[in-house]
Image (spheres, rainbow, N blue to C red):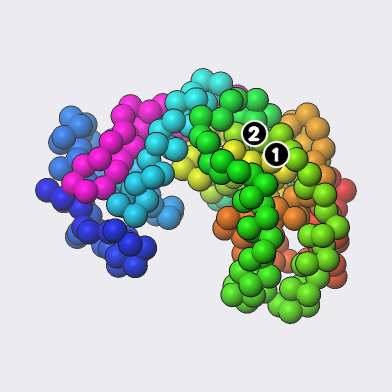
Amino acid sequence: MTFPIAQTEEQFDAVAEDEQALRPAVDALCRHLGIDGDVGRFAEGSLPVYAVGERHVLKLFPAVHLDEVPVERDVLAAVQGRLPVPTPEVFGAGEFGGWGYVHMERLHGASLRDVWPNLGDEERQGVARQAGEALAALHAITPPVAEPADWGGFVAAQKRNCVARQESRQLDPFWLEQVPGFLDSVDLGDPELVLAHTEVMSAHLLVRDGRLSGLFDFEPAMRAAREYEFVATGVFLTRGDAAANAALYDGYGQTVDPRKVMAYALLHVYSDVAWYLREVPTAATSLDGLAEHWFGPTG
């Protein structure tokens, strides 16, 4: 049994949600691995991910994303038991039926994305502080990934293409015209590079009884400046809540320069500032004001 052909993004997009095409190969993979239990696909995620019973998860990587298998596998192995928040144990990884897979432990808890809107201020700050503690521990681990090999070259390339990229994503000209001057005003220097998850957001965190019970989805991990990490937390976790940001930085053990984070929000691999503005609206009229609103501990 094989998975559908997905050598390109277009081929993958055509089959990514087609359970009639995917499920027979998923069942065959379960038999190959010797695992059983009710199989159910998680609703979210850019890649197909399936729960198998209460203990197992299979994350699938089409051929076009095979290079991400060793990243997820190696980073999960490197962080296992070393963070204050549980991460999935890796049971195995490889290729099957033309696709890659990572077989990992299933974590349990409620999605923080669903829980966050109903939390009180103190509860939000408590969860944010725990996230900061997890990031401090993560950033202390020697990165098992080498990409990008040339951080300075990566940043320079992202700068060159920044305005065109944001324009293609329908960022308002009001903001676009501020981008070159803002980036020129921020000294990104020669930072220490850390192991960054890069997508620590509420959708990738589980919570139970007020405690974070899981952090997952490590395939976008990379060596990065520490400020790069806080793009996702500011927009998709604390969501402009200054007190929660302050608690997160308190858990992290240091405050992060909001202007540097804003610069990386523009330069991020998946940057889409127009989307960020829809997610976390602002009354700010400058990128400096936006930096403080999204990433500052004072709002």
- Expressed as whole percent of the image width and height from the top left, the position of residue 199 reads 57, 46
User: Rounded to the nearest whole Å, what is the CA distance between mark 2 and mark 1?
Assistant: 6 Å
Name the disc covering residue 261, or none: none
Using residue 81 as the reference point, say whether residue 241 is left or right of it: right
Mark 1, residues whose alpha carbon is within 10 Å: few (<14), some, or many (≥20)?
Answer: many
The one nearer the camera, 45 or 37, is 45
Using residue 35 as the reference point, say whether residue 215 is left or right of it: right
- Do callouts 2 and 1 mark residues in contact (Cβ within 8 Å)? yes
Residue lying at the far bottom in this picture: please name it: 173
Height in image: 91 above or below 249? above
| Residue 168 in magenta stretch | no
- Residue matched to label 2: 194
Magenta region: 84-110
| Residue located 33% across and 27% down the image | 91
- Expressed as whole percent of the image width and height from the top left, the position of residue 48 reads 34, 51
* Label 2 vs 1, first from the N-terminus: 2
What amino acid type is highlighted by mark number 1?
A: Arg
Residue 230 found in image quarter: top right
| Residue located 81% across and 32% down the image | 254
The one nearer the camera, 145 or 95, is 145
Using residue 288 as the reference point, say whether residue 154 is left or right of it: left
Name the disc covering residue 226, or none: 1
What amino acid type is highlighted by mark number 2?
A: Val
Height in image: 287 above or below 229? below
| Residue 91 in magenta stretch | yes
Determine whether the residue tagged by mark 1 lies in a helix, strand or loop.
helix
| Residue located 20% across and 32% down the image | 33
- Expressed as whole percent of the image width and height from the top left, the position of residue 32 reads 16, 35
The one nearer the camera, 150 or 262, is 150
